Image (cartoon, rainbow, N blue to C red):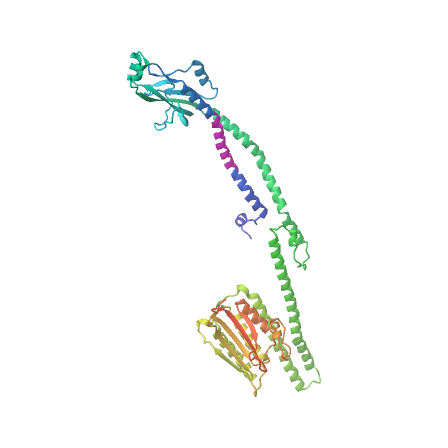
């Protein structure tokens, strides 16, 4: 029984539709607040521009009212209508200030903050800044007015001189003086205008955003519709229909997936065909010894069967059972080799030691057939003869090569057959090479590839066999990154013999 807590935290299956929708809508929803912030900044800038221009104009207008009197005193005369017009603002408070050369207040509000001392632009050049006035945020426009005041000598000369020449003979000394003019106003109108701009821009987005989400959802539904159609076509197929899917009937992005499915279908079709052929051949191979067993059993059960006939029947029964057992063992070995793959446990294997064990097991059979079975090559324990693989399968591969040579090499006491097993190490690539050589009838070049097919036996051998030994050798070799080749052991001689070569990868490992 499953725990309720496990069911609660169980992760649901991923949805491609939901994942794409999330990746499309999440940036859209995240960018909306960013767009709101950027719009607010732009609105603030737009709202400041017209009011800043008005402030600059007022500051310049006030600066024009600063004059130097006949007594060389700085004067600021603001007409009453202009003062009332300057103060007449329904939304904001407006302040102004005129500070003379000596710091005296010539007009306006005394507590209006002054600019920094180093912030002194040229004559009538207006600068803007943000400041605070009586606890309120204000926008300030300030300018400095440069005035040329006459020296005392020049003033006295103008008073006493009777002619212009006398005034000209005096040495005028002009002293520049700076007068500060400032105009400030609160920011209420600016905030109201910025809020109106924000409303005008963002309110339509509240209607556009849901519409955009709906359009994205509809577009995504339309976009993945070909996947649903492909699913329907696959579900509508019959179980035995392994024909490839039409790659042109799907979008370009789905074509690689369909191509991979077609490749899988082709491999599945080939695998099923091989299994069917394998089962048919296996049934055929087993049918012969089983039929012989039944026939010999029927012969042994006859009432008139003599002792010699009974012994002969029992001998044939034993021979048929041995053949059936060998065929079944070969089938199991081939199934184990084909089903091993990457899941096999692998370890370093000394191929020379493994060959020695196989030769010891095969020696009684070789002696029974009067065969000369020998070994030459590298010694056990050498690092170059190590193969990283499955010891059971590697030993099965070597055993099949040796059994195949013993089975197909003719031999008599007068003319014994010779079988030589070699272990070589390529001096250049350091690849491990195993050879099983005999002086039998050999294999014709046209049949050297076909002998690796299950249940195929070369013509003209006249020797019973299952036809599974070499397919087992090839399958195990391929799983260990090795190649198998066949060539004549004694080219140009009769019989030519056969030499089977298994070549492992560099260093004897796969």
Query: Is 45 included in the stretch rendered in magenta?
Result: yes
From the viewer's perspective, tell me whether residue 343 is left or right of residue 125: right
Q: Is residue 185 above or below residue 322?
A: above
Residue found at x 56% / y 31%? 203
Our reading of the magenta stretch's main secondary structure is: helix
Residue found at x 56% / y 43%? 24
What is the span of residues highlighted in magenta in the rendered image?
A: 32-50
The picture places residue 194, in percent across and down from the top left corner, at 50, 28
The picture places residue 355, in percent across and down from the top left corner, at 50, 75
Q: Is residue 15 above or below residue 345?
A: above
| Extreme-bottom residue of the structure | 414
Q: Judge by depth and name the residue closer to the eye, 508 or 295.
A: 508
Q: Judge by depth and name the residue closer to the eye, 340 or 185.
A: 185
The picture places residue 130, in percent across and down from the top left corner, at 41, 27
Confirm whether residue 335 shows in the render: yes
Hey, which quadrant is residue 84 in on the image? top left
């Amino acid at each position: 029984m499953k725990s309720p807590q496990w069911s609660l935290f169980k992760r649901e299956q991923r949805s491609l539709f939901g994942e794409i929708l999330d990746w499309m809508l999440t940036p859209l929803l995240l960018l909306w607040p960013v767009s709101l912030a950027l719009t607010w900044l732009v609105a603030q800038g737009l709202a400041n521009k017209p009011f800043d221009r008005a402030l600059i104009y007022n500051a310049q207008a006030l600066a024009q009212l600063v004059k130097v009197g006949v007594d060389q005193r700085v004067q600021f005369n603001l007409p009453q209508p202009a003062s009332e017009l300057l103060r007449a603002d329904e939304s904001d408070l407006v302040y102004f200030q005129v500070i003379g050369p000596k710091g005296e207040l010539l007009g306006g509000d005394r507590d209006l903050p002054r600019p920094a001392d180093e912030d002194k632009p040229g004559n009538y050049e207006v600068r803007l800044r943000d400041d605070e006035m009586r606890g309120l945020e204000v926008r300030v426009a300030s300018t400095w007015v440069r005035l040329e005041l006459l020296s005392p000598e020049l003033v006295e000369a103008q008073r006493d001189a009777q002619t212009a020449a006398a005034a000209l003979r005096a040495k005028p000394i002009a002293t520049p003086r700076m007068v500060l003019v400032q105009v400030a106003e609160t920011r209420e109108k600016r905030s109201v205008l910025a809020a109106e701009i924000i409303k005008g821009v963002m309110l339509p987005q509240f209607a556009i955003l849901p519409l955009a989400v709906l359009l994205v959802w509809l577009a995504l539904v339309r976009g993945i519709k070909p996947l649903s159609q492909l699913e329907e076509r696959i579900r509508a197929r019959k179980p035995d229909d392994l024909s490839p899917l039409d790659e042109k009937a799907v979008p370009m992005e789905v074509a690689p997936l369909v191509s991979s499915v077609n490749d899988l279908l082709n491999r599945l079709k080939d695998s099923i065909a091989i299994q069917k052929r394998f089962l048919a051949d296996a049934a055929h191979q087993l049918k012969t010894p089983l039929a012989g067993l039944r026939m010999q059993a029927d012969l042994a059960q006859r009432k008139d069967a003599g002792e010699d006939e009974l012994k002969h029947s029992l001998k044939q029964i034993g021979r048929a059972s041995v053949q059936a057992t060998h065929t079944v063992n070969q089938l199991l070995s081939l199934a184990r080799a084909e089903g091993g793959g990457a899941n096999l446990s692998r370890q370093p294997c000394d191929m020379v030691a493994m060959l020695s064990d196989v030769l010891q097991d095969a020696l009684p059979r070789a002696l029974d057939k009067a065969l000369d079975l020998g070994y030459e090559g590298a010694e056990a324990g050498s690092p170059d003869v190590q193969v990283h693989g499955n010891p059971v399968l590697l030993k099965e591969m070597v055993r099949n090569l040796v059994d195949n040579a013993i089975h197909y090499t003719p031999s008599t006491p007068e003319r014994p057959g010779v079988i030589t097993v070699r272990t070589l190490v390529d001096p250049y690539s350091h690849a491990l090479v195993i050879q099983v050589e005999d002086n039998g009838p050999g294999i014709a070049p046209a049949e050297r590839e076909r002998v690796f097919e299950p249940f195929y036996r070369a013509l003209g051998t006249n020797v019973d066999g299952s036809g599974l030994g070499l397919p087992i050798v090839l399958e195990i070799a391929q799983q260990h990154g090795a190649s198998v080749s066949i060539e004549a052991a004694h080219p140009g001689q009769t019989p030519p013999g056969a030499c089977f070569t298994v070549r492992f990868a560099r260093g004897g490992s796969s």
